[in-house]
Image (cartoon, grey):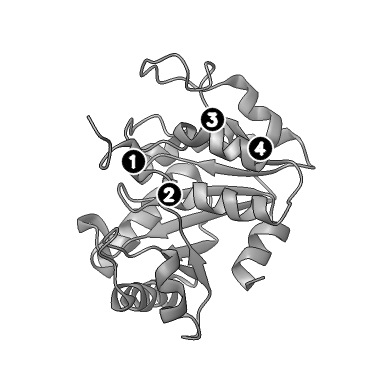
């Protein structure tokens, strides 16, 4: 088990995932849930809190997640109403209140999407990890000043402090070993500026052997969300 997965499985049980639009945070949230499920983490849940982006939502992988042992919370219709009603199920409070449950909160992009966490602020005052997913290849986080602005905007909006930076620099299937390493170095620079630890670098499975042993934890990210939008056959 890597240090990163150890922290996710044994650290603060509420894991809120935030980041700039398009950084890959939903793919990361679903991948993290699936990895923790492989570790037989009991009472594991994922709450889809994204009310902004209709194209990449973790609720679309509800069947796969629940078959793997991850209870999914989303809208009151559990994603089956066929409409784009921007509502959340009141039952999302359940894993937040249950101290035996480890829950991943997939928030929307930027500070506007992270704002939804304020609705659950009384549950997030303690025992919470706030993760900031960082993709250097996104225009809004391509330089340190922009990346820092996004991070601080999320903190200011939620009144929560980011506890870890997740490096997820990629070009989807065109990602190279160099992209992953460059992204990690960028995350380390942001870490040095903020004092917030960079926890891991994400990459697809086939790149893991190429970047392992480089001095950082590698997290194998899945491609669970792609065929729900960009690769969908019409």
C-beta proximity under 8 Å, tags 1 and 4: no
Q: Secondary structure at mark 3?
A: helix
Q: Nearer the viewer, mark 3 or mark 2?
A: 2
CA neighbours of label 2 inside 10 A, class few (<14), some (14 to 19), many (20+): many
Residue 27 — which label? 2
Name the residue: 46% across, 59% down.
221
What residue is disc 1 on? 227
What label does residue 118 carry, if any? none
* Pick the front one: 231 or 115: 231
Question: Label 3 vs label 4: CA separation?
Answer: 9 Å
Picture quadrant where residue 232 is located: top left
Mark in front: 1 vs 4: 1
Q: Quadrant of residue 47?
A: top right
| Residue denoted by label 3 | 119
Q: Residues within 10 Å of mark 1 (few under 14, many from 20)?
A: few
Q: Secondary structure at mark 2?
A: helix
When the figure is inspected, residue 96 is found, relative to residue 110, above or below; the finding is above
Real-space CA distance between mark 1 and mark 2, rounded to the nearest whole angstrom: 12 Å
Quadrant of the image containing the C terminus: top left
Q: Are marks 1 and 3 in contact (CB under 8 Å)?
A: no
Residue sticking out furthest to the right: 100
Which residue, given by chain and number where applicable, does mark 4 sit on?
123
Residue 54 visible to the viewer: yes
Q: Dot 4: few (<14), some (14–19), or many (≥20) neighbours within 10 Å?
A: some
Q: Earlier in the sequence, mark 1 or mark 4?
A: 4
Q: Between marks 1 and 4, how big is the CA–CA gap?
A: 34 Å
Q: CA distance from mark 3 to mark 2?
A: 23 Å
| Residue that appears at 43% across and 34% down | 50
Classify residue 176 by image quadrant: bottom left
Q: Is residue 70 left or right of residue 22?
A: right
> Where in the figure is residue 173, as x and y percent of width and height?
29, 60
């Amino acid at each position: 088990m890597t240090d990163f997965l150890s922290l996710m499985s044994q650290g603060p049980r509420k894991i809120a995932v935030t980041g700039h639009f398009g950084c890959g945070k939903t793919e990361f949230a679903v991948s993290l849930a699936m990895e923790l499920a492989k570790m037989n983490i009991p009472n594991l849940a994922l709450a889809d809190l994204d009310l902004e982006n209709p194209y990449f939502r973790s609720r679309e992988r509800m069947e796969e997640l629940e078959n793997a042992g991850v209870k999914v919370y989303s809208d009151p219709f559990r994603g089956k109403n066929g409409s784009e009603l921007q509502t959340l199920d009141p039952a999302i409070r359940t894993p937040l209140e249950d101290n035996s449950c480890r829950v991943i909160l997939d928030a929307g992009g930027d500070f506007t999407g992270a704002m939804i966490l304020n609705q659950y602020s009384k549950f997030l005052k303690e025992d919470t990890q706030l993760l900031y997913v960082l993709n250097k290849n996104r225009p809004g986080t391509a330089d340190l000043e922009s990346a820092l602005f996004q991070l601080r905007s999320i903190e200011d909006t939620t009144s929560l402090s980011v506890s870890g930076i997740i490096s997820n620099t990629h070009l989807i299937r065109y990602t190279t070993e160099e992209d992953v390493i460059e992204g990690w170095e960028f995350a380390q620079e942001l870490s040095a500026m903020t004092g917030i630890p960079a926890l891991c670098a994400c990459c697809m499975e086939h790149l893991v052997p190429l970047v392992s042993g480089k001095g950082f934890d590698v997290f194998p990210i899945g491609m669970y969300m792609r065929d729900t939008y960009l690769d969908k056959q019409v």
